[in-house]
Image: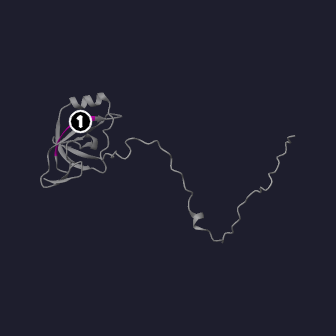
Amino acid sequence: MMSSQPTPIQGSRPVTPPLRSAGSPRSLESLQPPAYRQRDRSPSPMRGYLIPSPLPTRRNRTCSATARASEGPVFSGVCKCFSRSKGHGFITPADGGNDIFVHISDIEGEYVPVEGDEVSYKVCSIPPKHEKIQAVEVTITHLNPGTKHETWAGHVVSS
């Protein structure tokens, strides 16, 4: 017959860890954080072969904004400043006016722009209000003489 009372298993006792006092010495193992198991990932056939790109991908723009920018006039100006680590800089237009923002993904060509480089560019409005503009399709037309220029691959060239 089965009873509703649990039957104890012979020879088993509940195991409780010994209590430690605040002053008792502890082993180094007890001070280590628990080891976490690595998450199993499905192996990719390309794992180990892909090298992360040093350049961010081109920012997403709507097709209409890209088309409007490519159809627009070409302007010229001088690079006021550009930070490769920050990923942006500013261009001073040749005809005067406010400085124009330029993103790293909008620079075309082999060299990273430096202060004093002459550039040509087109403009595109910046969402969401479309009140400001930024330079797109930026190309260095003349390198600033006497300065060191870096290629996107990291090679330094003196001009």
The structure's colour scheme is one colour
Q: Position of residue 9 (x, y in %)?
A: 80, 51
* Residue denoted by label 1: 123
Q: Where is residue 65 in the image (x, y as percent from the top left)?
A: 29, 30
Quadrant housing the N terminus:
top right
Q: Can residue 103 be seen in this view?
A: no
Above or below: residue 92 compared with residue 72: below
Q: Is residue 44 left or right of residue 69?
A: right
Q: Is residue 155 left or right of residue 17?
A: left
Q: Which of 87 and 48 is in front in this view?
A: 48
Report if residue 3 lies within the magenta region.
Answer: no
Residue at screen point 71% across, 65% down: 19
Residue at screen point 27% across, 43% down: 101
- Give the magenta part as a residue range: 118-124
Q: Nearer the viewer, residue 154 or 63?
A: 154
Report if residue 123 lies within the magenta region.
Answer: yes
Q: How many numbered circles are shown?
A: 1
Q: Nearer the viewer, residue 77 or 82?
A: 82
Residue at screen point 55% across, 56% down: 35
Q: Can residue 25 be seen in this view?
A: yes
How crowded pointer 1 is (Cα within 10 Å; few <14, some 14-19, many 20+) is rated as: many
Q: Where is residue 22 in the image (x, y as percent from the top left)?
A: 67, 69
Q: Position of residue 124 (x, y in %)?
A: 26, 34
Q: Main secondary structure of the magenta part?
A: strand
Give residue 156's quadrant in the image.
Answer: bottom left
Tell me which amino acid carries mark 1.
Val
Which type of secondary structure does the marked residue at label 1 adopt?
strand
Residue at screen point 37% across, 42% down: 46
